[in-house]
């Protein structure tokens, strides 16, 4: 006969098994990785269709990652071995935490007391930081140029992104929790719409897509920030980039477009919309120089965002919804 | 001026070169000896205002040739100055790089491949041969025997 | 079949090395990678670093200056790696057979370093893009 203590023990064990399942399989690690690789296939397929060609088959990103796992890992002699190996793992764990926070806010908001927008914003810096660490530990002159470019890019786009979040917070009255923000749609107002567009460009730079892919692809003349990585470590970088394709548009959807209300299908539709916007911007633009990107983010986006913040504050103060 | 007048101006300084031909209305070929190379190049470039195109180095047999090609663009006329270097053991020419900096690289290449030395060249370094190619072996001379991929003299 | 070989066949990333070619074969290789021939269907992608590459597309008969650099690129490509000798010059020195500067065709230079290297020959001067694609696909099928 079960005593109440044994029943409690069994419930706690079931509870922790369920948490492990949520973290590792759905909607945690495996689900996000699977979704991320499917999203990267979607990026390549839509790019191919825009260029009037056929494009890769559905299993292509999975085959890419499998192939990379099967190749040998070469570590350059002049590199800092510890940081070289640790950098992709740092980036991967940062994106994993971000995915956990975002999915937690969607699936079980009551259980995520730490899931607020500042934590999410902080975690989105992790992939770029890991890229900077990894490429500067590579010990190669080409990757140090890539490091410098990535650092300049990160300095450029963080400011408008924070200003865009300030607009959202002004509308929500200072409430920081992600689940609460996901129930509003700031995009249906002037300042919210401006903030969404600017945040879309910042996400484009964070994902490393054209027109802001100068860190990785520019030195595609010789390789870029990931120049010295090969084999399994490169596979971790590719997985990290695939997971960013899930988490960053999801972040935009939850903060600006109203999350998964009124239904799950609406949420999926909004995510696909943001992804398609990112792909279309990627395919219709050439790459810009670092100084052009800085001018774009600081001067144009910055000034527009200050105007939007002023409008949002006025709207919140005078209770005008559409400002 | 047109090609006729160009030809007349060149034949005006008859004493500097040894032969002058005009096989086609817009082709003028001059031949001269090694001593007059700088003076004739200066005449063609500065006095007549022709454009220097390139120089070619050849090894026909008993002597070396360096041909300087000039163009007169308004009429489409080509003037070739052929300089004969008769000293085969120690071929030396005056460099025209002080007059025409654009000629410095082609003179380096002729020096690499044929071994013709250019006096007063501002920067005589190896240009197109491999870094580990032995000094003193000039591949395009007729008496250098090179097998594919190696050197045997 | 082994998952490693399957994934290598489905996603060969290529790196282009020019060891002293006249550039005709390079133009054809770049043509292959344009959207018209769409080699992304086979998973082929041009990468900028030899460390990301599965296949080296080598053009040109190897000159004395380029030979150590070709070997350096081959060493940096993580094994398993396939070398494609594209064009008549890469297969057997082509019209530069008696040249003073040619160290050897691609297979002679690479086999000095690694006698078990996998080398595929795509002859032509230059080979058409369709011929290059057919050579790559045949090599992958025979892996």
Image (cartoon, rainbow, N blue to C red):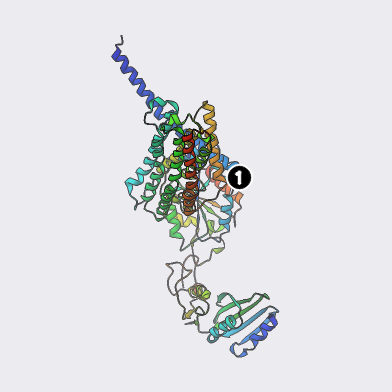
The residue under the point 58% across, 56% down is C27
Tell me the quarter of the picture where residue B50 sits.
Answer: bottom right
Q: Is residue A89 above or below residue A26?
A: below
Q: List x then y, in percent, for residue A177.
A: 41, 31
Instruction: Decide which of A176, A35 is in the foreground and name it.
Output: A176
The residue under the point 44% across, 73% down is B125
Mark 1: which secondary structure? loop
Q: List x then y, in percent, for residue A72.
A: 40, 44
Instruction: Decide which of B88, A30 is in the foreground and name it.
Output: A30
Q: Chain of mark 1?
A: A
Residue extending farthest front: A318
The reply, left or right, for residue B28 in relation to residue A43 is: right
Q: Can residue C1 be seen at all in this image of the molecule?
A: no
Q: List x then y, in percent, for residue C18.
A: 51, 57
Residue extending farthest top: A1
Q: Residues within 10 Å of mark 1 (few under 14, many from 20)?
A: some
Q: Which residue is mark 1?
A: A51
The reply, left or right, for residue C12 in relation to residue B23 is: left
Residue extending farthest bottom: B15
Q: Is residue A276 above or below residue A77?
A: above
The residue under the point 39% across, 48% down is A132
Q: List x then y, in percent, for residue A211.
A: 52, 48
């Amino acid at each position: 006969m079960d005593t109440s203590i044994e029943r409690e023990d069994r419930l706690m064990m079931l509870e922790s098994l369920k948490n492990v399942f949520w973290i590792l399989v759905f909607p945690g690690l495996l689900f996000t990785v699977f979704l991320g690789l499917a999203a990267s296939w979607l990026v390549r397929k839509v790019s191919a269709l825009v260029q009037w060609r056929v494009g890769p088959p559905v299993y292509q990103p999975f085959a890419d990652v499998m192939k990379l796992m099967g190749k040998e890992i070469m570590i350059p002699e002049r590199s800092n071995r510890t940081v070289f190996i640790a950098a992709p793992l740092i980036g991967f764990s940062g994106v994993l935490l971000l995915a956990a926070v975002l999915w937690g806010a969607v699936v079980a908001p009551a259980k995520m007391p730490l899931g607020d927008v500042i934590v999410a914003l902080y975690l989105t810096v992790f992939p770029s930081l890991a890229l900077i660490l990894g490429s500067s530990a590579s010990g190669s002159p080409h990757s140090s140029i890539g490091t410098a470019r990535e650092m300049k890019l990160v300095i450029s786009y963080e400011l408008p992104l924070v200003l865009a979040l300030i607009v959202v917070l002004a509308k929500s009255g200072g409430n920081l929790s992600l689940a609460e923000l996901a129930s509003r749609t700031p995009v249906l107002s002037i300042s919210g719409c401006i903030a969404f567009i600017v945040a879309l460009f910042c996400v484009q730079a964070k994902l490393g897509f054209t027109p802001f892919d100068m860190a990785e692809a520019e030195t595609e003349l010789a390789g870029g920030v990931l120049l010295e990585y090969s084999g399994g470590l490169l596979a971790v970088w590719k997985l990290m980039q695939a997971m960013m394709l899930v988490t960053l548009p999801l972040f935009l959807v939850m903060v600006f477009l109203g999350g998964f209300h009124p239904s799950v299908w609406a949420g999926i539709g909004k995510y696909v919309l943001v992804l398609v916007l990112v792909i279309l911007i990627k395919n219709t633009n050439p790459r810009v120089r670092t100084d052009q990107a800085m001018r774009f983010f600081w001067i144009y986006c910055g000034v527009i965002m200050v105007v939007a913040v002023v409008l949002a504050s006025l709207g919140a103060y005078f209770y005008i919804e559409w400002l | 001026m047109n090609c006729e007048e160009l030809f007349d101006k060149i034949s005006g300084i008859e004493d500097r070169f040894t032969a002058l031909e005009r096989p086609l209305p817009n082709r003028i070929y001059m031949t001269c000896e090694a001593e007059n190379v700088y003076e004739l190049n200066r005449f063609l470039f500065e006095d007549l205002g022709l454009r220097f195109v390139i120089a070619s180095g050849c090894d026909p047999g008993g002597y070396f040739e360096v041909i300087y090609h000039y163009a007169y663009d308004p009429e489409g006329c080509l003037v070739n100055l052929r300089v004969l270097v008769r000293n085969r053991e120690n071929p030396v020419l005056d460099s025209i790089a002080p007059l025409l900096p654009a000629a410095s690289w082609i003179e380096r290449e002729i020096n690499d491949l044929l071994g013709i030395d250019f006096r007063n060249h501002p920067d005589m370094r190896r240009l197109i041969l491999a870094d580990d190619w032995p000094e003193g072996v000039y591949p395009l001379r007729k008496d250098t025997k090179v097998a594919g991929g190696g050197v045997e003299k | 079949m082994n998952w490693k070989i399957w994934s290598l066949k489905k996603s060969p990333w290529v790196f282009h090395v020019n060891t002293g070619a006249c550039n005709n074969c390079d133009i054809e290789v770049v043509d292959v990678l344009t959207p018209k021939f769409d080699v992304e269907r086979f998973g082929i992608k041009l990468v900028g670093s030899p460390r990301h590459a599965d296949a080296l597309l080598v053009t040109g008969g190897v000159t004395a200056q380029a030979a150590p650099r070709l070997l350096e690129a081959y060493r940096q490509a993580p094994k398993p790696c396939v070398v494609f000798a594209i064009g008549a010059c890469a297969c057997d020195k082509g019209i530069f057979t008696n040249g003073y500067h040619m160290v050897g065709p691609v297979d002679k230079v690479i086999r000095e370093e690694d006698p078990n290297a996998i080398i595929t020959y795509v002859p032509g001067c230059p080979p058409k893009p369709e011929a290059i694609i057919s050579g790559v696909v045949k090599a992958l099928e025979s892996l």
